[in-house]
Amino acid sequence: MPEMAAFVAKLRAAFGDSVDEAVTRGKNGEPTFYARENGRTVGTPPADHHNAWRASEDVRDLHYCDGCDGSCIGTAIRCSQRMTQAMQGQQKR
């Protein structure tokens, strides 16, 4: 679950230990954290499915690219193109 792990790491950086507590509680059966990515699940699903964020077609079929920061999501630029542009920009410096 590389995309979810990266997302949780960003949440942890922003919100601190409360994120770890929510994940742990979700793993222990409380509906405080639930994630599903590529057929794998972690945590406890909510009793109602109305309070959930669902990946739309825009992000559902994305794959993890090493070194990607997600900035290509929702743009017409493919991850490989963005990485190439970033490397070219670094070489010009």
Image (tube, helix red, strand yellow):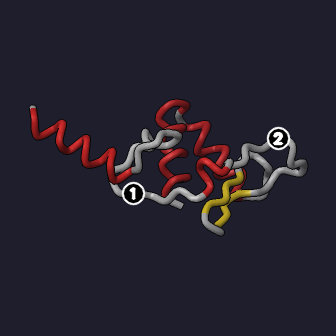
Marks 1 and 2, the one that precedes in the sequence: 2
Mark 1 crowdedness (10 Å alpha carbons): few <14, some 14-19, many ≥20: few
Instruction: Please name whichever residue, 8 or 54, is drawn nearer the observer in this view of the structure.
Output: 54
Q: Which residue is mark 2?
A: 51
Residue at position x 60%, y 40% from top? 19
Going by the image, does 66 lie left or right of 26?
Answer: left
- Identify the secondary structure beneath mark 2: loop
Going by the image, does 25 lie left or right of 9?
Answer: right
Quadrant of the drawing holding the N terminus: bottom right
In this view, which residue lies farthest toward the bottom? 39
Going by the image, does 47 lie left or right of 55?
Answer: right
Give above or below for 36 relative to 40.
Answer: above
Q: Amino acid at mark 2?
A: Asn
Q: Which residue is mark 1?
A: 65
x and y percent of residue 44 in the render?
76, 57
In this view, which residue lies farthest toward the right? 48
Residue at position x 82%, y 40% from top? 51
x and y percent of residue 89 in the render?
18, 36
x and y percent of residue 26 in the render?
72, 53
Residue at position x 49%, y 59% from top? 63
Residue at position x 11%, y 40% from top? 91
